[in-house]
Image (tube, rainbow, N blue to C red):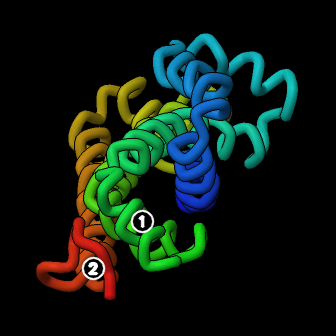
Amino acid sequence: PLVLGVAISAVLGIGFGLWIGLSARSEWVFSPIFIVMQAAPLAALIPLLVMAYGIGLTSKVFVVCIMAMPVIVLNTAGAVRNTPASLKEMGQSFLASDRQVLLKIVIPAASPVIFSGLRLGVSAGFIGAILAELKITPTGVGDIISYSRSIADYPSMYAAIFSIILLAVVFLNLLEKLENYLFEGNNRGYVSD
């Protein structure tokens, strides 16, 4: 559920964030929804998701998405909205199309904040995945943590927790390497060629 939920959150979150950041009307309508999603206590929503989608993979993926997507959307929207207007105007003065302004100016200028949102979203997704495994169905690492705690096998419990932390660090390092690959060296935060 983690990889699927984070992938869905990243794709939809960046898409929604770009849309919200570029349109004042969509920001007015959708930004409060994502703020509420970010502030809502997830533990209270899990029983509703279980009633709606059952105890399978779907509800776990929804939990990960509810945790990860608001952070990604709000960071992306803020980054796009705060792209310097002078850069956009410069592109338009050189007769760049809206698509070219988006791809060559807005996204490169917003990329550092977008990737910060992705890193925060991945971290929140890990929390959501573990919460889903603990609350929805005791499977995977959540089951190991619950079972080890119930029989006072603390070394196994801490080993499971450490493995989650290690996996999160690996995911975040891979995301950082992807960011460095896409925006090599000094190109991060600058307009592309």
Between 57 and 179, which is closer to the camera in this rendering? 179
Nearer the observer, disc 1 or disc 2? 1
Residue at x 73%, y 38% (from the top left corner)? 59
Q: Position of residue 183 (x, y in %)?
A: 27, 79
What amino acid does circle 2 point to? Phe
Q: Position of residue 118 (x, y in %)?
A: 39, 54
Q: Is 28 above or below relative to 63?
A: above
Q: Is 37 above or below relative to 181?
A: above
Q: Visible in this render: residue 144?
A: no
Q: Is residue 21 left or right of residue 47?
A: left
What amino acid does circle 1 point to? Ile
Q: Which residue position holds label 1?
A: 107
Q: Which residue position holds label 2?
A: 183
- Quadrant location of the C terminus? bottom left
Q: Is residue 53 left or right of residue 152?
A: right
Which image quadrant is residue 71 in?
Answer: top left
Residue at x 24%, y 34% (from the top left corner)? 154
> Could you say which disc has been placed on residue 144 in the image?
none
Q: Position of residue 80 (x, y in %)?
A: 42, 50
Q: What distance separates the C-alpha of mark 1 from that of mark 2?
A: 11 Å
Residue at x 45%, y 37% (from the top left corner)? 74
Q: Residue furthest front?
A: 93
Q: Mark 1: which secondary structure? A: helix
Query: How many C-alpha atoms fall within 10 Å of the one at disc 1: few (<14), some, or many (≥20)?
Result: many
Between 111 and 72, which is closer to the camera in this rendering? 111
Residue at x 58%, y 41% (from the top left corner)? 20
